[in-house]
Structure formats: structure tokens, C-alpha cells
Amino acid sequence: MPKGPRGEKRPSDVIGCAIMVARLSTGEIAETPKPKSGKMRSGKAGGKARADSMTKEKRSAIARKAAEARWS
């Protein structure tokens, strides 16, 4: 059985998928997505901590370097 973008179990045939969508929309079944992984949460927290610890000039230099790489 194929998996959706967040690990949901989905039927692979067209009719089975249509039936599942109908059941989800009427509330007959409920699909509970998996919680976000700890890596995703800690990555966001680490990025915020890194940005908070840098000076404005250092953040500006990093942003300038990224913009040059993007537009070159």
C-alpha cells in the first residue's frame, strides 16, 4: 500500500482512493498524520539559536554571500 507525504496509508487503485476520500470528507474515518520528527523540531530550534547568537553584521554577510550565490 502506498504512503502519503506524511506516512499515511493510501490505496493504490483509483476507485479505492475515491472511496477513501469520500469517507474522509464525510467523517466516517479519520486520518491521523504522524507527528513531526524530533530532527525537524531541533533543526528549527538550532537555526533560531544560531541566528540569535550572531551579530547583525555577521548575519548580513551570510545573507549577502547567499544572494550572490543565488543570482550568479
Image (cartoon, grey):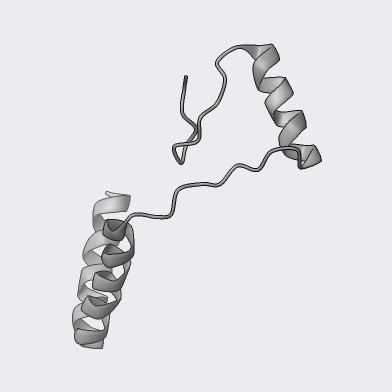
Closer-to-camera residue (58/3): 3
Q: Determine which quarter of the picture holds residue 36.
A: bottom left
User: In percent of the image, x 75 and y 38: which residue is there?
Assistant: 28
Q: Determine which quarter of the picture holds residue 66.
A: bottom left
User: In percent of the image, x 43 and y 54: which residue is there?
Assistant: 35
Reply above or below: 28 against 55.
Answer: above
Reply above or below: 32 against 29.
Answer: below
Count of number-bearing discs: 0
Q: Residue 38, position in %: x, y? A: 29, 60
Closer-to-camera residue (63/47): 47
Q: Residue 27, position in %: x, y? A: 76, 42
Q: Is residue 64 left or right of residue 16?
A: left
Q: Is residue 1 left or right of residue 66?
A: right
Q: Is residue 61 left or right of residue 1?
A: left
Q: Residue 23, position in %: x, y? A: 74, 32
User: In percent of the image, x 66 and y 13: which residue is there?
Assistant: 14
Q: Is residue 66 left or right of residue 21?
A: left
Q: Residue 46, position in %: x, y? A: 24, 71
Residue extending farthest front: 28
